[in-house]
């Protein structure tokens, strides 16, 4: 057992969780008293982030056949990533125990997957949020990682997508296709990197509307913490991946904490990466996961960024 990590199958008590929130939103001490270690209190809410990102930026999309304009955080300009030191550091051995003994049965319960806000996700995500959910350094790090590791000519699926997918600017011309699924159709419509998209609530219907072996790579950006049926989603990703294809999950410490599952809120950064590794293990059909710290260095780079990925077993 590694110090500061989780106990396998441990879950946060919703009673203590609620108590921590009532003691004061944004109070690290209150949350720690309630036993919720490793919670990021630097979350940003929708338009609040846009307000600080530059006045006057907008996005126009079609709503019921008519153009409608929404306030937006300005898109990061070409070359912004040059302001950061970008690296890819393999931390697999630090995150995953080589001799870890897994329980035979999937150890996570419905209580582990409960959220503080169990109202319909469709309502929570009904208003489009045209903002970045991590800082510019984290965006640069993820874009760099994709550019270094996803080969040209790939068919890509971006699940839990939004108005930006953080792929290199060249991807729409160098990739065969880029498909997106996400909660908000207007955000997906605004995503200029997508070849096609399908609005989809994976918590309500954890099934992807694509044939078997359709994609070479599936990506998921800072969203696995919201999945309350992660095992079903991972198995669906395995189904739509071609043999030898990769599932790449990126994770920071930013979150809508009322929509994150209970077990996630009780973990530190590495514990969360280890949890994603557990999802891969119990989904089956994937190679042993790898973990990378790709956090950017430089002025204004505050958000960490990590990768957990695994490859679908079988011959390509």
Image (cartoon, rainbow, N blue to C red):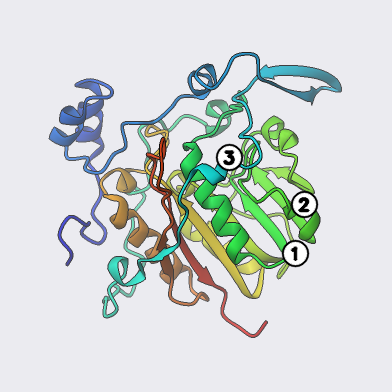
Q: Which of 150 and 198 lies nearest the eye of the viewer? A: 150
In the displayed structure, 228 sits above or below 175; it is above
| Badge 3 element | helix
The numbered disc on residue 29 is none
Say whether residue 149 is left or right of residue 225: right
User: Mark 1 or mark 2, which has the lower sequence index?
Assistant: 2
Marks 3/1 in contact by CB < 8 Å: the verdict is: no
**Mark 3 or mark 1, which is nearer to you?**
3
Residues packed near mark 1 inside 10 Å, few (<14), some (14 to 19) or many (20 plus): few
The answer to whether one can see residue 203 in this image is: no
Marks 3/2 in contact by CB < 8 Å: the verdict is: no
The answer to whether one can see residue 147 in this image is: yes
Residues packed near mark 2 inside 10 Å, few (<14), some (14 to 19) or many (20 plus): some
> At which x and y percent is residue 262?
32, 43
**Mark 1 or mark 2, which is nearer to you?**
2
Q: CA distance from mark 3 to mark 2?
A: 19 Å
Q: CA distance from mark 1 to mark 2?
A: 22 Å
Q: Which residue is mark 1?
A: 211
Q: Which residue is mark 2?
A: 172
Rendered-image quadrant of the C terminus: bottom right
> At which x and y percent is residue 220?
55, 52
Say whether residue 4 is left or right of residue 251: left
In the displayed structure, 3 sits above or below 303; it is below
Instruction: Give the residue drawn at x 29%, y 56%.
Output: 271
Rendered-image quadrant of the N terminus: bottom left
| Badge 1 element | loop
**Mark 3 or mark 2, which is nearer to you?**
3
Find residue 197 and report its image quarter: top right
> At which x and y percent is residue 302?
37, 39
Instruction: Give the residue drawn at x 70%, y 37%.
Output: 188
Q: CA distance from mark 3 to mark 1?
A: 37 Å
| Badge 2 element | helix
């Amino acid at each position: 057992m590694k110090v500061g990590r989780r106990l396998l199958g441990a879950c946060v008590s919703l009673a203590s969780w609620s108590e921590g929130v009532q003691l004061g939103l944004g109070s690290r001490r209150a949350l720690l008293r309630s036993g919720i270690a490793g919670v990021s209190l630097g979350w940003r809410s929708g338009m609040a982030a846009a307000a600080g990102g530059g006045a006057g930026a907008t996005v126009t999309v079609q709503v019921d056949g008519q153009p409608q304009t929404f306030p937006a955080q300005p898109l990061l300009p070409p070359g912004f990533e040059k302001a950061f030191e970008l690296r890819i550091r393999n931390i697999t051995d630090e995150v995953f125990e080589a001799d870890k003994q897994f329980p035979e049965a999937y150890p996570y319960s419905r209580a582990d997957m409960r959220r503080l806000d169990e109202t319909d996700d469709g309502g929570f995500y009904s208003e489009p949020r045209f903002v970045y959910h991590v800082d510019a350094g984290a965006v640069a790090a993820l874009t760099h990682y994709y550019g270094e590791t996803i080969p040209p000519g790939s068919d890509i699926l971006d699940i839990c997508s939004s108005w930006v997918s953080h792929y290199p600017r060249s991807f729409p011309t160098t990739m065969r296709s880029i498909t997106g699924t996400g909660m908000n159709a207007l955000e997906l419509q605004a995503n200029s990197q997508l070849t096609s998209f399908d609005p989809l609530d994976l918590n309500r219907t954890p099934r992807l509307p694509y044939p078997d072996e359709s994609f070479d790579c599936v990506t998921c950006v800072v969203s696995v913490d919201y999945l309350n049926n992660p095992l079903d989603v991972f198995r669906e990703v395995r189904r739509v991946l071609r043999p030898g294809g990769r599932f790449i999950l990126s994770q920071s410490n930013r979150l809508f904490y009322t929509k994150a599952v209970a077990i996630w809120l009780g973990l530190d950064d590495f514990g969360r990466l280890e949890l994603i590794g557990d999802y891969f293990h119990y989904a089956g059909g994937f190679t042993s996961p790898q973990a990378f710290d790709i956090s950017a260095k430089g002025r204004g780079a505050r958000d960490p960024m990590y990768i957990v990925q695994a490859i679908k077993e079988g011959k390509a």
